Amino acid sequence: MDINCMEGSRTASMEIKKNEIYTLEITGMTHEGQGVGRIGSFAVFVDGTIPGETVEIKIIKKAKSYAVGKLISITKQSPHRVPPFCGSFPRCGGCHLQHMSYKAQLSFKTDLVRESIKRIGKLKDVQIHETLGMENAFYYRNKAQFPAGLYQGQPTLGFYASRSHDIVPSPACAIQHQVSDRVRNIVREYIVENGVSVYDETSREGLVRHVMTRVGYKTGEVMVVIVINGKDLPQKEKLVNMLISRVPSVKSIILNVNTKNTNIILGETNIKIFGSDTITDFIGRFKFTISPLSFFQVNPVQTEILYEKALEYADLKGNETVFDLYCGIGTISLFLSDRAKKVYGVESVEDAVEDAVKNKKLNQVENVEFIVGEAEKVIPEMHSRGVRADVVVVDPPRKGCDEGLLKTLVSMAPERIVYISCNPSTLARDLGYLVENGFRAVEVQPVDMFPHTYHVECVVSIKRKHSD
């Protein structure tokens, strides 16, 4: 680093004082939706601000190279600022961008993807489309998770505050399916009326830890999962009667046992106390069974858009062998099956593969085979046996693809790769590797799966360089 820059940073660091008030011009946004400004050469991050605004802030954290400010007032307001739709904003950690117009949110996500591809992937000749948003960006989530705890001495079921495990009570949530709020309020009523204890993370005492709902958007079926720090729920018959009499669409009520000292919400043991072990829903023409532990996309409307774009990029003619890596419960595999000769779905989670096999049978699909194992181990082994793919679809977790898997894809040299990503940073890194090793990133389509949050999903068309 240049000595003058070091001196400037040191000077700015010395000038900035915790708990002092400063005027700040917001010039950018981080990937987590925080506004960014500078005092001298010192970066300052502020939640709830928008580029172009001038704000008064209070410094609440000071580090060596940056500071965090709390918004006090806005002296120059962005034309993209809108009134928050939720009374729990900004304390609730769920919707970080609801102070921005939806159009501005989509622009932010497009810019985030473009910047990641350019800065991290070092790629310039990639067509990046505008983010595909929703016509109605509310009540889109088919899964809700409400932590239980005490608020002002009373049991509550709410959401965690931003960057903490303090519970913020919220009587209604505008991004969850509306039946989830009804279920949550009934369970809280049962807890209060029957003196049921709620979990305390510090003492590890108390019974009810979380309430989770899952809703079939097309079937209307509802699953209620009560996560408990114990083996049973007192007077559970009362809870069952309250739920099924007031929410007739409830088809499944499950006790999930989690007695471990962990941040993981669900335990491994499920006890059915009403109805079925699963509910069902559709994505396109395909029907899926959903269990408490199943991974199932939380925004069914945008999921269909995402999968249709993946099918478009796969460009299947009917005679291809396709690998669907990190396939989960087989949703994408089944979509691909209509247009491919053979689909191999690979997933490391055994329970997910069991669900995938059930979904294959449920939909009477014959040309899909599901394999349990880590993609980075299974695919090299299949490749060594001469099984190769014409098209590969990858949908990895946030950490992206293992480098060993990328090396195998390079040596296998499929005609096309379709990369679905929930993290623009790791996507850009992996694209950079593939482009350096014989592939071309053709186009990227961001899809807004999570309106009012900073998350964005992408689907990417990748081709072998000589295949054109």
Image: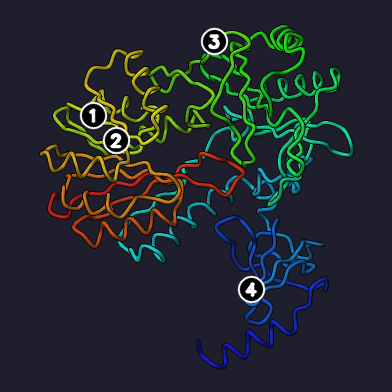
Q: Is residue 223 left or right of residue 285?
A: right
The residue beneath circle 3 is 276
Element on which disc 4 rests: strand
Q: Is label 1 or label 4 in front?
A: 1
Look at 39% across and 27% down and name the residue there: 329
Going from N to C along the chain, the mark reached first, 1 or 3, is 3
Marks 4/3 in contact by CB < 8 Å: the verdict is no
The residue beneath circle 2 is 324
Element on which disc 3 rests: loop
Classify 10 Å Cα crowding around label 1: few (below 14), some (14-19), many (20 and above): many
Q: CA distance from mark 4 to mark 3?
A: 53 Å
Element on which disc 1 rests: strand
> Where residue 295 sits: x, y (%)?
47, 30
The residue beneath circle 4 is 43
Badge number at residue 343: 1
Marks 2/1 in contact by CB < 8 Å: the verdict is yes
Amino acid carrying mark 3 in the image: Ser
Classify 10 Å Cα crowding around label 3: few (below 14), some (14-19), many (20 and above): some
Going from N to C along the chain, the mark reached first, 1 or 4, is 4
Give the total of numbered labels: 4
